[in-house]
Amino acid sequence: MSKETISFLKENFRTTQTGVYNIYYAFIEHGIKYLKNSGKLSFIIPNNFLTIKSAADLTFYNILRPIC
């Protein structure tokens, strides 16, 4: 990734501010941010998403997001 892209991701997405990350973290965070409370969102993601350390911020973000 270019330095500009990395800077943009770190400045605009909580899930890409620290450590090693994949660009799909920002993609998922962005989708969740604009999802309506009654909305549904689906992604095909790597199967290790829930267990890899670098995805901890994203899984934490998803768990704490208020669900109505």
Image (cartoon, grey):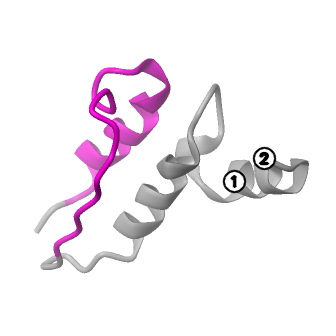
Query: Quick check: 61 left or right of 54?
Result: left
Query: Quick check: 50 left or right of 6?
Result: left
Residue in the foreground of this view, choosing between 22 and 19: 22
At horizontal 81% and vertical 51% (from top left) the residue drawn is 7
At horizontal 58% and vertical 48% (from top left) the residue drawn is 23
- Up the image or down, 63 lies above or below 50; here it is below
**Do the residues bearing badges 2 and 1 touch, measured as CB atoms within 8 Å?**
yes
Residue in the foreground of this view, choosing between 32 and 41: 41
Task: Tell me the crowding category of disc 2: few under 14, some 14 to 19, or many 20 or more residues within 10 angstroms, Cα based.
Answer: few
Instruction: In the displayed orientation, state which residue is furthest to the right.
Output: 3
Q: Position of residue 8 (x, y in %)?
A: 77, 58
Disc 1 is placed on an element classified as: helix
Q: Quadrant of the C terminus?
A: bottom left
The span picked out in magenta is: 40-66
At horizontal 49% and vertical 60% (from top left) the residue drawn is 27
* Amino acid type, label 2: Met
Q: Residue 38 in magenta?
A: no
* Amino acid type, label 1: Leu
Q: Quadrant of residue 31?
A: bottom left
Task: Tell me the crowding category of disc 1: few under 14, some 14 to 19, or many 20 or more residues within 10 angstroms, Cα based.
Answer: some
Q: Quadrant of residue 37?
A: bottom left
Q: Residue 58 in magenta?
A: yes
Task: Indicate which disc residue 1 carries.
Answer: 2
Q: Position of residue 9 (x, y in %)?
A: 69, 53
Residue in the foreground of this view, choosing between 27 and 60: 27
- Up the image or down, 64 lies above or below 53; here it is below
Q: Position of residue 22 (x, y in %)?
A: 56, 40
